[in-house]
Amino acid sequence: MSGLEDPSDDLKVTAPKKWATGAPAVAHALQYSLSQTSPRRTALTLLNLNQGKGIDCPGCAWPDPDPKHRPMNEYCENGAKHVNDEATSKRITAEFFRQHSVSELDEKSDYWLNQQGRLTEPVIKRSDSDFYEPIGWDDALDLLAEELRSLDSPNEALFYTSGRLNNEAAFLLQLFARAYGTNNLPDCSNMCHESSGSAMMETLGTGKGSVSLDDLHHSDLIFVIGQNPGTNHPRMLTALERAKHNGGEVVAVNPLPEAGLMRFKNPQKVRGVLGKGTTIADQFLQIRPGGDLALFKALNLLLLEAEDAAPGTVLDHEFIRAHTTGFEEFARQARELSWDAVHAATGLTREEIEQVRDRVLASNSVIACWAMGLTQQKHGVATIREIVSFLMLRGNIGKPGAGVCPVRGHSNVQGDRTMGIWERVPQSFLDSIEREFGFTPPQEHGWDSVDSIRAMLDGRARFFLGVAGNFVRATPDSEVTEKAMRQCRLTAHISTKLNRSHTVCGETALILPTLGRSDRDVQRGVEQFVTVEDSMSMVHASYGRLEPASGSLLSEVAILSRLARRVLGEDDGIPWEEFEGDYDAIRDRISRVVPDFEDFNRRVADPAGFRLPNPVNSGDFRTDSGKAVFSSNDFEWLDAPDGYLVLQSLRSHDQWNTIPYANDDRYRGIHNARRVVMVNPADLEELGIADRALVDLVSVWHDGVERRATDFRVVAYPAARGSAAAYYPETNVLVPLDSVADTSNTPTSKGVIVRLEPASGQR
Ligand code: SF4
């Protein structure tokens, strides 16, 4: 696999932190920021981050509070690090590519690649060369267009997107792909919240969360499930703190006792800096990975039994009768549960789960928040369906302080879907495109990320355009994925910085450098802004504030518009040139195509932006029956054989998506190393493995292929019994391409059965 680092023998381990944020987070954010750029640029980014007419943080999709009540420093450690990672003063020039061959770059770590700075001019790796070399924009786009026109079918092309892409560019990308003739629009959602969308579409008729920040602030009880907000959406802790101060409670469900789930020291408050901070979880359920379906089945049974004991007092019969279907069958199946099976699946006791039931019974409003701990499991969709049923039993959908809250990690991943980046976009969206632009989009579904890899492997796809993101590192089964990418005739990436997807490339490869979210974007002398949609369906503007990293950068909108004109010709009826020169013109078209975006330009001029309505909040369930659906889900869990553990891959605290910002994981007490595997001391004893032993992780899968991640240091850690945790992308190699969640096709990166063997080099 590309870019392996040496086993880190400098590993230092300290006690895991019991609280998140506080003054150290501010210090670390500043330290990293100033290691990247000048104090002046740091100040400029931070003063503008998440402010009205400022830069929307590209870090994650957590929403901003109302601008009237928004403090000056409305960002977190990771947001500050990320925006300044983009604002770095370091530059990659033609000289850099003359000095480093692609093969050499491929040996470098992901950290090293990212640290080289911003890309400044388009480069090409020709089929007979091992070096990238400069190429002019016109030549680069001509070559891309020629390649696209030469394919036997438009479906041989893949157009991948990550959640960094803004709404305007996302709308143009899907429009271009469909006008060209394909729905092959895989995106990073396929790897993260696809399971949430699948489960909620089936049960509620919407793929999006239903709650607002205000709901969170005023909820009686908030579940935080399979999620590590202290690292992945740190400002969520401010919202949880506020809920706690309003009298709400939090139940955290996770295999690791993450610092941010335990206690939060708000750096914007004196008591947060000097005092003890706020306890977050009133109850922590240390669950085995993949045990959440069993947990919610158990809770649902307990609620039904509570209703039996006191009829008419527990369930919301009015909601169930008026708004749902499937209750009888759901209730019948729920009563078949075995508590022994629940204990085996979750590692939790009945008493712990009964305590949670009591909290639920004492609450008039309940929110369930979740992230990858649920979605990246084989039965992730079933688990989320079960959570929807759990909420519906007491009418916790569509009322204040209650609802579903899938917390998204990438800043505009939800907006990109809204704009039509979806290989299975609804027919109504395709019909709107046809009405507005006068062409018939392709009707058959395209390929998602996993199917795109399969298509590259067997030669059905030969062209890959990645607009933002790092496909090679975001996807499973690294050796297989790398082979797939290398088999493409042409790969091209529209990127701000160097990453692994540039070194694992097709026969011919292009890197097309683009503006970052923080860069000023001027078209025809007029400053442009872009828009994004956060995890709670708020749409708002983002303005670049920095001088671009180079005069040769083009915006994503400009690159896509120019490419489209070359591929489709000037007479395709789509005003690409106008789009490039004036983003208002794109938003006008979005208004006419995308539901709920009427009068987009006027509404987005409000610094607060606007909230897209979620139909479930007005009792409108857009399922086949017109009602919300109680589902009946088979009992499933991850049963690792003796001698095996259930591995979850995760981010370190000092990491942004696929990119490490340091070889540390500050909150978990891991320093100077990433190739570590965290295992409960009792499991290590049973397995006869010593703390700090050097091991290989070997995953088992029924295809008989041995997948091995070599040279990991064992760290005794308070992980759930029977589980292990290690960082991705280093462990992606262990996730079989075919190991995916039912229905959603999401790789099961949080549920890989592994054994630990002495490192190959030591045997
Ligand atoms: S919580 Fe997310 S969006 Fe907010 S500042 Fe942090 S990384 Fe950025």
Image (spheres, helix red, strand yellow):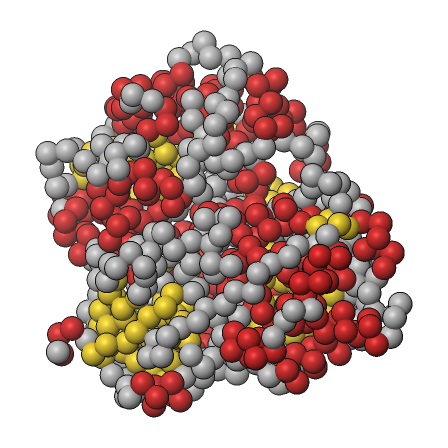
Total numbered circles = 0
Q: Position of residue 144 (x, y in %)?
A: 29, 26
Quarter of the rendering containing residue 456: top left
* Image-based side of 688 in relation to 59, left or right: left
Residue 34 visible in this rendered orientation of the protein: no
Q: Residue at x 26, y 50 (%)?
A: 480
Name the residue rendered at 34%, 52% in the picture.
Answer: 737
User: In the rendered view of the protein, which quadrant contains the N terminus?
Assistant: bottom left
Depth check: give the residue in front, 328 or 623.
Answer: 328
Residue at image position (28%, 48%) is 481
Q: Residue furthest top?
A: 571
Task: Determine the image quadrant of residue 399.
Answer: bottom right
Q: Is residue 434 left or right of residue 710?
A: right
Relative vertical location of residue 52 with respect to residue 433 in this rendering, above or below: below
Q: For this rendering, which residue is in front, 590 or 284?
A: 284
User: Height in image: 292 above or below 380?
Assistant: below
Residue at image coords 35%, 48%: 470
Q: Is residue 432 visible to us here?
A: yes
Residue 179 image offset from top left, x and y in percent: 46, 21
Residue 172 image point, x, y percent: 49, 29
Q: Is residue 249 above or below residue 659?
A: below
Q: Is residue 478 left or right of residue 541?
A: left
Q: Quadrant of the C terminus?
A: bottom left
Q: Position of residue 32 (x, y in %)?
A: 40, 65
Residue closest to the far left: 128
Left or right of residue 497, residue 20 in this image: right
Question: From what the image shows, is residue 3 above or below residue 280?
Answer: above
